[in-house]
Amino acid sequence: MIATVIVELALDREFDYTIPDGMPIEVGMLVEVPFGRQTKRGYVVGLKETSTFKKLKSIGKLVSDKALIQPEIMELARWMADYYITPFEQVIKTVLPSAVRGKDARFKEVYFVVPTPKASDEAAAAQLRKTAPKQAAALDVLIASGTLPMAELARAAGTTSAAIRTLEEKGMVEITLEPMGRDPLAGMNFLKDKPLTLTAEQGSALKIIQQSIDTLDPSVVLLFGVTGSGKTEVYLQAIQEILEQGKGAIVLVPEIALTPQTVRRFRSRFGNDIGVLHSHLSDGERHDEWHRIADGEVRIVVGARSALFAPVKDLALIVVDEEHDGSYKQDEAPRYQARDIAVMRGHMHKCAVVLGTATPSVESYHNTLINKFACANLSCRVDDREMPMVHVVDMRNESVLQGGPSVFSGDLRTAIQDRLDRQEQVMLLLNRRGYATSLICPKCGHVEECHHCSVSMTYHRKRNEMACHICGDLRKVPSCCPNSACRTPHFKFSGLGTEKIEGMLHGMFPRAVIRRMDSDTMTRKGSYEKVLGEFRTGKIDILVGTQMIAKGLHFPNVTLVGVIYADTTLHMPDFRAGERTFQLITQVSGRAGRGDIAGEVIIQTYTPSHPSIQSARTLDYDGFFDEELAFRKSLHYPPFSRLVCITIRGPQEALVAFTAEQFHKALEKEVDASSVMMSTAVPAPIARMKGQFRYQIMLRAPHPRRMSQPIRKALAGFTWPPKVKCTVDVDAVSLM
Ligand code: ADP
Ligand code: ZN
């Protein structure tokens, strides 16, 4: 037998090796192979009878004693490498966490203490009690509880590990070094809860999902349920049944929604059957969690994007919660969309897939209309709670009323005061952090820009600094206008950020407790949990934040949600701007009125008649969808085409422009112009980022293969000048 091996070298090639007699090789194992004069690590990606090469070397040794990549994950990885035009090895690195494949990957080992038969010898124990009471105490605890980790035994008996070592010398205990699972949730207490009695709508949704789980050729189910309609309860009960059948499930949630609140709901229902994978895990925790899953100790995995590749045994269901969420798309190679790959994994391995959301992506909803996906609807909130009342405030009128541009409309101010008086809570959304968006010279109009990116710097007052929100560069505020012909000593701040809103609120409502939640204030591990905890217990009256506060949170005492400036996402040069605005407003509105008191939402905007804002106001998904779909169709945007965005970047603008043009010509030779629409090479909307000039070529076609084959060919025949780099983004989400 011959094994094909991918060597850890970033070469996009597979090499053949013979297998030494008796070596139990399986696809997916990590091995050591001779490579040139060196020894390298690699993964066995295939087995075959013969090789076209004559002289083959043989595999050195096994590094893992079991396959680290399941055959089904291997198949999926191959598909992804092809679809996303990415080297196979890079995909392998994505599906297998570095904490598992790395050189230092091992279980954490701790000392365990076991009593020997001599420990129960009465005479010896009596002797010990007289001469060494601490050792005697340790022995008593140990006999009462059996084997214990050394540290725990010492703590429980009020003694030291030295005393326990002495017991070992006396032959009364044995000390061994053994692996210990690191459970990231250890120490959290959970009250066990029971399944709720489902509403009629939840019941029929569950039935549709169960049918899908039970058939041999399951279809994808879009669980389209308004905010607060109890989608999570439906997932929980579907998973319950899967556990009873002895099978496994994966639940994907956006990273930001992976709060203790979400985890607790799953933990309370399923206890230790749950594994959690998110980015705050240490490498050790991730390693141990992965092996608990691979060994079948854990059958349900909750996690962010990459949890999709968890080695769950007998996978029967994948849930993608908040399927519309942008964070499911990875922004580095392989640039995969986890929702789409979930559908693919389900399709390849015949397991059910549920996509849940209150605001389906245009692509997914379209798939239900053309019968590619099944649909289950939850049109009401549980307990007949009402959907919030949504008002739109036209800020153009407001500036007339208040005699100048204003940040808070009269309506919003009154409504906030009202809630404070009634001791209810308020959430305010502004999808832009910082204090002012830019510093403008009032005389010459100079705007301070980042030296490395073509965006203006954002003023942060607390730090008295300007920050670039793309590369993170920081700069002191200049003492006068940097324009040498001007040098005016005063700068004007223009635009709004969350920091400024927070400051204004303190001025307007001095007695209220106000907290801000954005990526500037949430830098420390645990700060997110802390603020949410304080908000839940009512210590905070007003929570101001970016989109971070819009997702999946459930606070029954929030009765008012305000959107300060709904237009932030609307005017981006991106065909999905309208969709994102609709989703963001609807999601944040959904935080209002989840308890016994009805909720109210106030949306402030300068473009009140925009369809995305109007549909969000009337909670009219279909209205939004029809309009959006017509627009997508007229311009051949997804879902009526697949889209590939090629970005070419480098430090010298002229060279980047020239290379982009050359590559465009190379593409023209390969692409079939009758079925592929291709743009010319043009500067990207953010023309410079981190010191790199950027050009884009956009391709659209009904089928992705129409583009990937020609792109692959063009790439293979193209020589890139030094320092000019190219990235290919299939099904691109960010077009900036
Ligand atoms: P969604 O995810 O659709 O926004 P959630 O799953 O967060 O909604 O549910 C909202 C609230 O309703 C939660 O507190 C949940 O415990 C509760 N809930 C869900 N289903 C039921 C039910 N059948 N009976 C009573 N309460 C329910
Ligand atoms: Zn920058």
Image: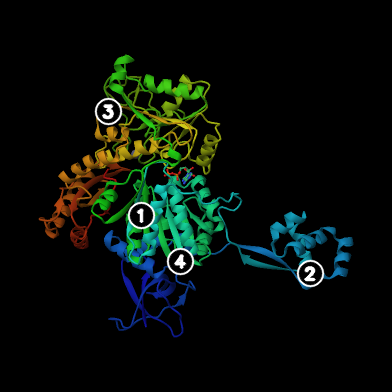
Q: State yes or no: Cβ of the residue under disc 1 lies below 8 Å from any atom of ligand 1.
A: no
User: Looking at numbered disc 4 in the image, what kind of residue is underneath it?
Assistant: Lys
Mark 3 sits on what residue?
Answer: 608
Name the mark nearer the viewer: 1 or 2: 1
- At horizontal 31% and vertical 61% (from top left) the residue drawn is 80
Which element carries disc 2, helix, strand or loop?
A: loop
Give the image quadrant in which the ligand numbered 2 is located: top left
User: Looking at numbered disc 2 in the image, what kind of residue is underneath it?
Assistant: Met
Residue at mark 2 to residue at mark 4: CA–CA distance: 42 Å
Which element carries disc 1, helix, strand or loop?
A: helix
Which sits in the foreground, 656 or 184?
184
Mark 1 sits on what residue?
Answer: 338
Residue lying farthest to the front in this orientation: 200
User: Looking at numbered disc 1 in the image, what kind of residue is underneath it?
Assistant: Ala
Which sits in the foreground, 366 or 9?
366
Which element carries disc 4, helix, strand or loop?
A: loop
Residue at mark 3 to residue at mark 1: CA–CA distance: 34 Å
Mark 2 sits on what residue?
Answer: 172
Location of the N terminus by quadrant is bottom left
User: Looking at numbered disc 3 in the image, what kind of residue is underneath it?
Assistant: Pro
Q: Is residue 551 above or below residue 512?
A: below
Mark 4 sits on what residue?
Answer: 313
For label 3, the crowd category at 10 Å Cα-Cα, with few meaning under 14, some 14 to 19 and many 20 or more, is some
Can residue 705 be seen? yes
User: Which picture quadrant has residue 126?
Assistant: bottom right
- At horizontal 37% and vertical 49% (from top left) the residue drawn is 356
Residue 32 in percent (x, y) is at 44, 73
Of mark 3 and mark 1, the one earlier in the sequence is: 1
Name the mark nearer the viewer: 4 or 1: 4
Residue at mark 4 to residue at mark 1: CA–CA distance: 19 Å
